[in-house]
Amino acid sequence: MDKKIIIRVPATSTGIGAGINSIGIAFGLYYTVIVEEEMDRWQVNHALGDDVPRDENNIIVQTILKVDPTIKPHQLTVMSDVPIGRGLGSSTTAIVAGIKIANALGNLDMSLDDEINAGSKIEGHADGVASALLGNITVSYFNGKMATTVKTDIPEVINALVYLVKDDGTHDKAIYKDEVSSVDAVKASSATNVLVASLMNNEWTKATEMMENDAIYTDNIYDIVPELEVIRNQAHQLGIYGTFLNQSQRSVITFGTSSQLNELRNALSDSNLTGVMRLIKVDHTGATVRGE
């Protein structure tokens, strides 16, 4: 390899509205991997903690070898501002980075569709992988073999206020119903249809209202994640819609303009929330590769 390869992958969130394992979005927090010299064995340099392997057991390396087992070991250096275990796709970013690295080192000439399919097979669904690769909001279907994805642009003025739920071990209960009645199934399907149509037609106000459809949540969702109710109610008082619980239940996310979200963050300062709030931009580019 004559020069370093730099992979940058955006954070993602899934579970928008009733679009479970289907609708995802990319955020402006990034997982960056620098591919350096060839080595006798894989070496992954990072400051992500002792729980993240630094050898061939690292998820990046495992992904590389799943895509192309013939690729020789290299030194990789990882830098990331994507929080681990908070529902913003920290594992997805590593998988997408691995696919991009395999494509570059193996000269595989994979298309974006090929990369989405590869990542979907590893993750078991396409939503996060598609958003990380393409940016913006994506809508995907994965049948276990092939993913079909459509990307739509989100308005440039829209950002997200992300509330990172305090990791105290209590947010591990099922948030979706085990069985959904035909009435709730119709509600969820109808809301998702309108959500997707609104996104594709750039009718953002309608889209944000549909993001709040709770037909498939358990009836006691506010007991399980009380922060969702607090943030949503405060947002509604300010005329802001589009608050949803991330599929991992580790983040509560609200969409809006910077001024709206700053107002919401200030209003929530007296709500005794124990987690962390971050104002984050939407990523409109997706994963990038430099230095090939």
Image: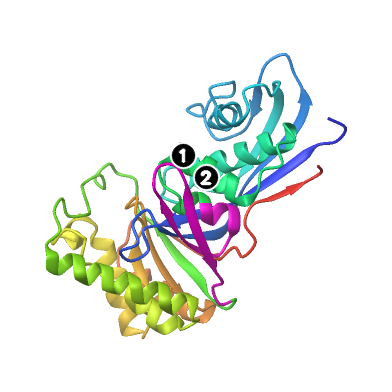
Residue 178 image offset from top left, x and y in percent: 15, 50
- The local crowd at label 2, few if under 14, some if 14 to 19, many if 20 or more residues have their Cα within 10 Å, is many
What segment carries the magenta color?
A: 130-155
Residue 264 image offset from top left, x and y in percent: 41, 76
* Residue 252 visible to the viewer: yes
Residue 25 image offset from top left, x and y in percent: 49, 61
Q: Secondary structure at mark 2?
A: helix
Q: Is residue 94 left or right of residue 244?
A: right
Residue at 59% of width from left, 28% of height from top?
61
Up the image or down, 28 lies above or below 192; here it is: above
* Residue 211 visible to the viewer: no
Quick check: marks 2 and 1 in contact, CB under 8 Å?
yes
- In the rendered image, which quarter contains the N terminus? top right
Residue bearing the label numbered 1 = 121
Mark sitting on residue 117: 2
Q: Nearer the viewer, residue 142 or 240?
A: 142
The number of numbered discs placed on residues in the rendered structure image is: 2
Up the image or down, 165 lies above or below 200; here it is: above
Which residue type carries mark 2?
Asn
Q: Nearer the viewer, residue 159 or 233?
A: 159
Q: Is residue 283 left or right of residue 124?
A: right
Which residue type carries mark 1?
Lys
Up the image or down, 140 lies above or below 266; here it is: above
